[in-house]
Amino acid sequence: MTAARAHYLECIKQLRNKFGKYGHIKLVRRKGLKINPSGLYEPVPMIIFPAKVHTSVQFATNATAKDKDQYGGMETWAYSAESPVKKDNEYQCVPKSIKVATYEMVLDLEKDVEFIYFLLYKCPQVFYPEAVNKYGKIKKGELIIDDKDEREARIADGRKAAAKLNHAIYGDKTSPLFEASALRATAAAWGIEGALSEKATEDEVRNNLFADVERQQKAKESTGTGRGIEEFLDFVNYDEIIKARALILHAIDAGIVQYDKVKFCYIYESTGNPLLIIPEKAKHEKFDYLCNFLLQPVNKPAWEKLRKEVITPEFMKGQPFTWIKWLADIEGLPLAAKSEKDLRAALVERYS
């Protein structure tokens, strides 16, 4: 029982740290109360579930591999409100089933600690995300913890994240996706189909990107895995990669680099010299393939050549200072010692 006890003690400590040693835990139905046409709440159906469950063995986070090998598999847990009854040389739980006749159930973390442990970490009728994510408990249950502070914090965090997402995609010049080239490159890298197509307007790309991130956020909230708003904002913050992809996209949009459908090759329009042959397996993601090639450290000469083809004084006139600093950093120019005007002049000289 040593391994089981270690898990019990770890979980109880987490609960007491979260809810207070002498606090309470309130379980409520996952589905809210229903109101009938007359405006009254409908009767709450009773939930009856067994006090004995079969579940996968759970281990404390510091459990040894030896313990996992020795005790891994399935185990049976039973809850007894009083002392268990021994019958036919086997202990049986009392009660044999657990009844929840109301919408909510309040448990004392001091008096009902064993019952709380059984419900949150072993019983499949209670959904407790921490047990699911940390110890592999089954992802279902008709009851959940009603934690007001956590719920309000979750709502607030969700609204803050939504505001950041809205700013990132639809914001002003301080937005990382304000420029069309950065927007399209980011959307394409995120996986938005048609983001690089001339048929798709800038607003259409923004709307499709926003809708896709929201859709993936809902899926993440439902399953607990996947990409959502937080992952997208982290993705956008890869400034160097996004700016580099936007520069490559500009080269294609401006016709400086063209794709030869006959030769399956990107070429420089000015000379006709090949830049990169696209293999058959990458023909449906040729832009990503080109970006990955150019941004590999071993292909530094090819990346430098592309920059010299693309970056002109006219190009730099339309770029914000953040882009100028990024280009200067690539070229190894001292950022702290130069003003924006000096950096622009130094880059014009570098790329002339």
Image (cartoon, rainbow, N blue to C red):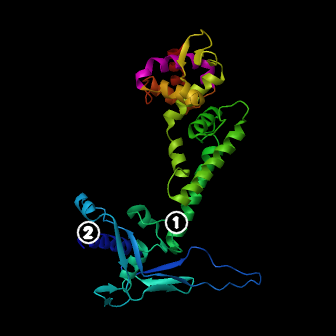
Amino acid residing under circle 2: Ala
Q: Is residue 209 above or below residue 133?
A: above
Q: Amino acid at mark 1?
A: Ala
Magenta region, mostly helix, strand or loop?
helix
Front residue of this view, candidates 74 and 278: 74
Give the quarter of the figure containing the C terminus. Answer: top right
Q: Which residue is mark 2?
A: 3
Q: CA distance from mark 2 to mark 1?
A: 34 Å
Could you tell me residue 57's position as x and y percent? 34, 67
| Residue 165 among magenta residues | no
Residue 138 drawn above or below residue 275: below
Return the mark for residue 321. none
Point out which mark residue 153 bears.
Answer: 1
Helix or strand or loop: what does disc 2 sit on?
Answer: helix
- Residue 168 makes an appearance in the image: yes
- Residue 290 appears at what percent x and percent y? 53, 25
Could you classify mark 2 by the number of other residues whose Cα lies within 10 Å: few (under 14), some (14-19), or many (20 or more)? some
Residue 31 lies in quadrant: bottom right
Name the element at disc 1. Answer: helix
**In which quadrant of the rendered view does residue 92 lie?**
bottom left
User: Which residue is at the front of the view, 164 or 1?
Assistant: 1
Q: Quadrant of the N terminus?
A: bottom left
**Residue drawn at the location 55% of the way across and 51% of the way down:** 228
The outermost residue toward the front is 88
Quarter occupied by residue 18: bottom left
Question: Where is residue 202 shown, x and y percent of the image?
Answer: 70, 37
Point out the stretch of residues depicted in magenta: 297-317
Residue at image point 51% right, 48% down: 231
Q: Nearer the viewer, mark 2 or mark 1?
A: 2
